Image: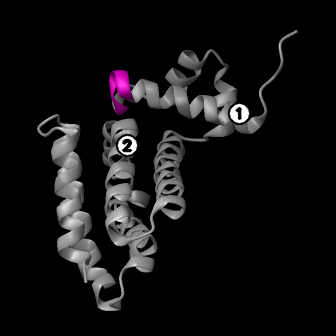
Amino acid sequence: MVTRLTKEARRDQLLDVATQIIREKGTEALTLITLAQEAGVTKPITYNHFATRQSLLLAIYKRCDKIFVETMNAKIEHQANCFDEAVQLFSDAYLECVEQNGREYEEVVFALMAYPDHRHVRRVIRDFFCDVLIDVFRPFVTQPQQLLPLRMAAIFGAIEGIATMFNEARVKREEARKAIEDVLCCQLRD
């Protein structure tokens, strides 16, 4: 007897397949029709979950952000007892997320920027990342001015650049981790 997937499980399966398509063929190859074909489902199933290609790309983007936050929270909230530990755990968790979804995430972001509703997605990402940084390091930073938005934006820019170089295999993981740690320590250490 074949069991049907729940709506949530089917959505997760479709997002997994969509991410695989992007990984193997790029965002240009991702349509609701190719998703249906690759997932082995009918077209109406993909259209029921994602009415448009834009909504599919947005769902992939949001899923990556959710994974990022969950990874950060799991590692830091339960394991960091001091600033240095938080820095190490943040760096490792961030690079883990980059390894899992970095290239696909960047492709999805660039594809979303083509839609008028999402042309400001880079700003949304920056603000989201800055909020995560503040949440992660607030318990370990005693001077509130260390967590000002402009400083967080500078950290984001530096870490994003490091991640890009890591994604392009221009630096090794250990080099990227050390560079991220240096940025965080220089900007946030009291």
Which residue matches tag 1? 9
The correct choice, above or below, for 107 with respect to 79 in the image is: above
Which numbered disc covers residue 42?
none
Residue 72 is left or right of residue 189, and the answer is right
The residue drawn where x is 31% and y is 54% is: 91
Residue with the most extreme top position: 1
Instruction: State which tag comes first along the sequence, 1 or 2.
Output: 1
Q: Quadrant of residue 134?
A: bottom left
Residue with the most extreme right position: 1
Amino acid type, label 2:
Glu
Q: How many marks?
A: 2
Q: Quadrant of the C terminus?
A: bottom left
Q: Main secondary structure of the magenta part?
A: helix
Query: Residue 149 placed where, x, y %?
Result: 31, 81
Query: Residue 136 placed where, x, y %?
Result: 43, 69
The residue drawn where x is 59% and y is 30% is: 14
Q: State whether residue 108 appears in this view.
A: no
The residue drawn where x is 43% and y is 24% is: 21
Q: State whether residue 91 appears in this view.
A: yes
Which numbered disc covers residue 96?
2
Does residue 122 belong to the magenta stretch? no
Report helix, strand or loop for mark 1: helix
Compare residues 122 and 145 and report the one nearer the observer.
145
Q: Quadrant of residue 169?
A: top left
Query: Residue 38 placed where, x, y %?
Result: 53, 17
Compare residues 153 and 141 and report the one nearer the observer.
141
Q: Which residues are magenta?
A: 23-27
Compare residues 33 and 8 and report the one nearer the observer.
8
